[in-house]
Amino acid sequence: GQQVMQIPQYQHVQEGEDFTTYCNSSTTLSNIQWYKQRPGGHPVFLIQLVKSGEVKKQKRLTFQFGEAKKNSSLHITATQTTDVGTYFCAYVQTGANNLFFGTGTRLTVIP
Amino acid sequence: EAQVTQNPRYLITVTGKKLTVTCSQNMNHEYMSWYRQDPGLGLRQIYYSMNVEVTDKGDVPEGYKVSRKEKRNFPLILESPSPNQTSLYFCASSYRALNTEAFFGQGTRLTVV
């Protein structure tokens, strides 16, 4: 079952401020993925991290996978109103075969 | 166009009346799964399937059934729906569970009264 905590549950920021969401696991993860769900929409894949210590960037988004492969973060620089939505981490535990999702962080951006 | 199609998008039903939510993908994916989404609880996995005729329980399988007779289809069956199954349901598919992107359907908003 789910052993990954995602924090915070909610985050309100002024447009232009930075935002970070974290996923923390008690066990080692095979990989971690990040998804974004716009209000009223379905989750859409953003990125996958596989290697220990991996860092990937997509424009204003920076994704990190911890050295121990037990935690990950998504950081958005200078948020825009288009960043509004819920961000989920998703993971496959080492030795398992199914994809679980974190509880998500709902981001609100105030113009 | 590569997609996962769920039907219906919205459904209101009464307690105990059997229903099926269909899910079909056109990407020849091996792995398919069902999730329910409830406020504050994120996406919880109901069932998943590694391939045809191979299904297994996720975190919250009680009250649900699935089948995988064909690679493209993975219907979710509620034999006797109850109000606590009121939720937003998503079907997803990916080439494999591990190391591949999951594609989601548009979702099915189910209300059981």
Image (cartoon, coloured by chain):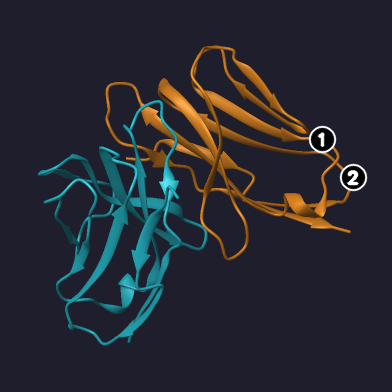
Disc assigned to residue A77: 1
Nearer the observer, B68 or A88:
B68
- Please name the residue shown 26% across and 87% down the image: B14
Residue at disc 2, secondary structure:
loop
Above or below A59: residue A12: below
Expressed as whole percent of the image width and height from the top left, the position of residue B2 reads 43, 47
Amino acid, disc 2: Gly
A71 relative position to B1: left or right: right
- Please name the residue shown 31% across and 71% down the image: B85
Expressed as whole percent of the image width and height from the top left, the position of residue B66 reads 17, 57
Residue at disc 1, secondary structure:
loop
Q: Chain of mark 1?
A: A
> Which residue corresponds to mark 2?
A16
Hue used for the chain lettered B:
cyan
- Please name the residue shown 62% across and 62% down the image: A39
Q: Earlier along the polypeptide chain: callout 2 or callout 1?
A: 2
Res. A85 image quadrant: bottom right
- Quadrant of the image for the C terminus of chain A? bottom right
Nearer the observer, B67 or A68:
B67
Output the letter for the chain in orange.
Answer: A
- Quadrant of the image for the N terminus of chain A? top left
